[in-house]
Amino acid sequence: MTPRSRRIVLPAAALSAALALVPAPNATHAQGTPKILLIGIDGVRPDVLAEVPTPVMDSLAASGWYTAGTRTTTPSVSGPSWSSMLTGVWPAKHGVTDNGFEGRRYSEHPDFLTLVERERPELTTFAAVDWLPLASLEGGGPALSIAIDTLVAVDGYELGWAAADSVVAARAAQHLASASADAAFVYLGNPDETSHRHGSIGVEYRDAISLSDRHVGWLMEALRARPAWEEEDWLVLISTDHGRREDGGHGGDSPEEMTTFILASGGATGSWPVAGPTFIVDVAATALHHLGVPSEIAAELDGRSLAAPGEGRPIR
Ligand SMILES: [Zn+2]
């Protein structure tokens, strides 16, 4: 791990972080220093995503790789699902089976950013979230450990979720545009919370997904503004933790609740193999594979890299 860990909790007043990000020419880089940005958007049903105007994600998918046939955890609940996306292992290993996070075993099965810090401590890690349990649980640790170099955590329940997502995206964009960064995770919670609040997958939920797409745009503009963008090989992964029912609820094992998506964008993603069955645990495995984290670490994950179909997947 790098010498100093910083945990930053932003006050609501930081909301107005003004960004002057100028998009650089769009370019792709199959070669260069490998970097990873994972954008996690909570509770986005892929069939609804397909119906909502999301020009940024559409553009990324068109030049990259996309599957709308990924399977999440049982149960299809944020705590176990995000734990599996971030650690690359199923709940049987990480121990999280609900949003109480009882029984979590993150010390044995850490998040992928912490694995990066353990294996490649010279790399710089960053995370920004507005669902606090991911970042602030005491005793047994949060999903995102203190090994991560910079962690921005805001409270979506306090700020309101649309505003909180904007703070998270703005702060992350500010960091990604200029700071040292090798591996990053940005969490947006507004679509899930909006659907719960309205008890539907209707217009409010769809507007929230469109807002998330604009936030993804901020993050992409930030990457393209990096001084070393031309020398870097950014893999951008965008995914969600679970789907939902028509009434906005989730947690069951229906296809609408269990089916998620993975979008991959970056220099080499256009040549990735066509997706077979994919699983939420593949996200962390893909991120670590791109960064070149040793294969013995990857072998302990339940997921496998989406870029390397020849590598084995443990049977779950
Ligand atoms: Zn969720």
Image (cartoon, helix red, strand yellow):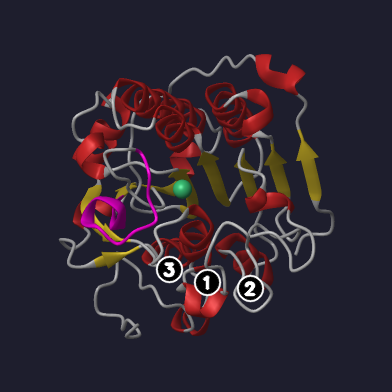
**Crowding at label 3, few (<14), some or many (≥20) Cα neighbours within 10 Å?**
many
**Crowding at label 2, few (<14), some or many (≥20) Cα neighbours within 10 Å?**
some
| CB of mark 1 near ligand 1 (< 8 Å) | no
Look at the numbered disc 3 and give the secondary structure of its residue.
helix
| CB of mark 2 near ligand 1 (< 8 Å) | no
Residue name at image x 24 percent, y 40 percent = 61
199, above or below 269, in the image: above
Q: Which mark is residue 293?
A: 1
Say whether residue 13 is visible: yes
- Which quadrant is home to the N terminus? bottom right
Looking at the picture, tell me which residue is in the foreground, 263 or 249. Answer: 249
Asked whether the residues under the numbered discs 1 and 2 touch, taking CB atoms below 8 Å apart as contact, a structural biologist would say yes
| CB of mark 3 near ligand 1 (< 8 Å) | no
Look at the numbered disc 1 and give the secondary structure of its residue.
loop
**Residue 209, quarter of the rendered image:** top left
Question: In the image, residue 22 lies at what x, y percent?
Answer: 49, 17
**Dot 3 corresponds to which residue?**
285
**Dot 2 corresponds to which residue?**
119
Mark positioned earlier in the residue sequence (2 or 3): 2
Disc nearest the viewer among 1 and 3: 3
